[in-house]
Amino acid sequence: MKLRRIRTHLAIALLAMLTLTACDKDKDAPQPEDLCRLVERTAAVSPGDIVILLHASEWVTAHEQVNVPDGKRLIIMAPEEAPAHITLGPAGFRTAAGVELVNVDIEATNITTPLIALHNLPSTDFDGTYYRLGNITLRNVRLTGMHGSLINDGGTAYCIDTLTLDRVSIQLMADSIQHRAALISLQHSGVRTFNVNNSTVGGKTAVACAAQ
């Protein structure tokens, strides 16, 4: 009887040690970088564009809107052979100078705003009719869980020099149809050059999209 009790106690102690080891491993596991803080730190030391080079298959998250400082263009790039992963929510990017996303997979299920919202109080050049924005580029980007617009001007008149969608895959959720959200909603803005190459829009059910 004593031998059985000893074996039982040893088994319980061993199980406890294994559980603690597993917990320690989870605690020591690297946490994803906060994209908002990464943008802020890079902007503080960069006089020009905010260039963020992500590692192969790196995972970053944003739990609030990624605000790009006025006058600065945000460029996020990763290796083509191993795109980085970005989880956004509850908001996407806000800019008045342009955005370039290259070789990234974006999880947008939690976003309740457009992926790229143009700033409603821009300080960029104004030509009397439009605010000059620069370029918006998505290249080798996969977007999943989209509920609303890819781009929305928020009622402000912008002139986007070049809008490029190159090898972009967009998965729309069913409620994007119910909300009648235009994929590219530029109600007061215009685009000088619009380039689309090998890009698709789809979902689990048939969807219809339009650009305003």
Image (tube, grey):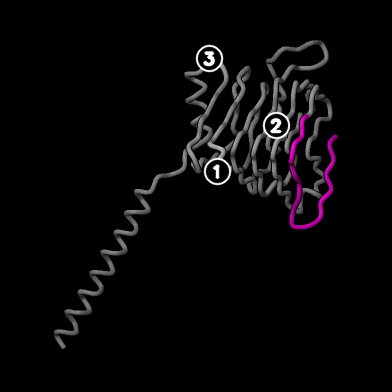
Q: Are marks 3 and 1 in contact (CB under 8 Å)?
A: no
Answer with the quarter of the image where residue 106 lies.
top right
Q: Earlier in the sequence, mark 3 or mark 1?
A: 3
Label 1 SS: strand
Identify which amino acid the numbered label 3 is placed on.
Pro
Magenta stretch, main secondary structure, is loop
* Residue positioned 15% across, 84% down in the render: 3
Q: Do the numbered discs 2 and 1 sit on residues whose CB atoms are within 8 Å?
A: no
Report the mark closest to the observer, 3 or 1.
1
Amino acid residing under circle 2: Ala
Q: 64 or 29: nearer the eye?
A: 29
Give the magenta-colored segment's residue range: 195-212
Q: Secondary structure at mark 3?
A: loop
Q: Which quarter of the rendered picture does the N terminus lie within?
A: bottom left
Q: Amino acid at mark 1?
A: His
Q: Quadrant of residue 181?
A: top right
Question: How far, Cα to Cα, is label 2 from label 1?
Answer: 20 Å
Residue 178 at x, y percent in the picture: 81, 51
* Residue topped by disc 3: 47
Give the quarter of the image for residue 139: top right
Query: In this rendering, which labeled residue sits more in front, label 2 or label 1?
Result: 1
Which residue sits at x=75%, y=33%?
152
Q: Is residue 77 magenta?
A: no
First in residue order: circle 2 vs circle 1? 1
Residue at numbered disc 2: 117
| Badge 2 or badge 3: first in the primary sequence | 3
Q: What's the mark number on residue 85? A: 1
The alpha-carbon separation of the residues under discs 3 and 1 comes to: 27 Å
